[in-house]
Image (cartoon, rainbow, N blue to C red):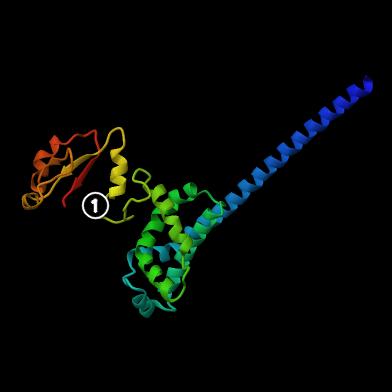
Amino acid sequence: MIWTVVTAIATLISMVAYLMSVYYLRTELKGLEKDRYLSVTNELFALWQSQEFMQSQLWLMHSLKERTWQEFVIAHRAGAGELAFHRVGSFYDRVGTLVKMGLIDEKEILSTMGGYAIGVWLVIGPLVKEARTLEHSNLFDDFERLLPACYECYVPALGSEAKVIPFALTQAPPTITIKETQKRLQQASPPLFLDVRQAGHKETEPRRLPGAIVIPPDEIQARYQELPRDREIIAYCT
C-alpha cells in the first residue's frame, strides 16, 4: 500500500517536472524568437533609415526619368543610378524573402515601409520586368510578391488591388473590375450604379445597368444631392 502511494507520488512529481520543463522550453523559445525578430527588424529599419539608402530611394521615386531598361543602362550603367537601383530593389527583395520565410511580420514592418515600396516599384517595375528578359530572370521576384501586402498595409480600406500612387499630388481615379463588382452585388447593401455617359452615347446604346441613376457628367455638380450618402456608388461611362 505504502509502495503504491510512493509510486503514485513519484509519477505525479515526474509529470509536474515534465510539464514545467516544457513550459520553460516554450518560454525560452518564444524569448529567442522575439529576440531574433527584434534583431532582424532593427537591422532592417537601421538600413532603411540610413541617409545613403533614403537618398537612393527618393532619387528612384522622384528623379529617375528612364522608362526602358535600355535607356536606363545607357544612362546609369556602373554609375550612381544603377547602384541606387540595386541597393533599394535588393533591400525590398530581402524584406519579401524574410516575410515569405515567416521571420518578420509583414503588417508590423510594411505599415512603415509599404508606401515607399509601392512608390519605388511603380517606377522601377517596368525596368525590372524588361531586365528579367535580358539579364536576370529572377530579379527582385520576392519584392514583386510583397506588393499585395504593401497595398494591404498602406491602404487597408481599399484592399490589395488599390491603384494608389504614394506621395503623388495627383492620383489615378479608382477603378473596379467586373469580378469585384459582381462580388459586391452579393452584399447585403449592394452598390448603386451611376450612369454618367454623354447624351450621344446613350442614344447609340440606350440600355443601362439595372437600377442605375442617370446623370450626365456636366450635371453632377448640380445634382449630386440626388445620390444616397449611405451606399457605395459605382460610376460607369461606356
Give above or below for 226 relative to 143: above
| Residue occupying the point 31% across, 37% down | 186
Residue 50 makes an appearance in the image: no
| Residue occupying the point 86% across, 25% down | 8
Residue 139 lies, in percent from the top left, at 46, 68
| Residue occupying the point 31% across, 48% down | 179
Q: Quarter of the image holding residue 89?
A: bottom left
Residue 175 lies, in percent from the top left, at 26, 50
Residue 6 lies, in percent from the top left, at 90, 24
On the rendered image, what quadrant is the N terminus found in? Answer: top right
Residue 5 makes an appearance in the image: yes
| Residue occupying the point 56% across, 51% down | 102
Left/right of residue 70 with respect to residue 222 in the rendered view = right
Residue 77 lies, in percent from the top left, at 41, 78
Q: Quarter of the image holding residue 3?
A: top right
Give above or below for 111 relative to 94: above
How many tags in the picture?
1
Left/right of residue 179 with respect to residue 7 in the rendered view = left
Tell me the SS state at disc 1: loop
Give above or below for 134 relative to 203: below
For disc 1, the neighbor class at 10 Å (few under 14, some 14 to 19, many from 20) is: few
Give above or below for 217 relative to 211: below
Left/right of residue 115 with respect to residue 104 in the rendered view = left
Q: Provide the residue designation for mark 1.
A: 173
Left/right of residue 216 with respect to residue 9 in the rendered view = left
Amino acid of disc 1: Pro
Nearest to the observer: residue 134 or residue 49 = 134
Nearest to the observer: residue 156 or residue 200 = 200
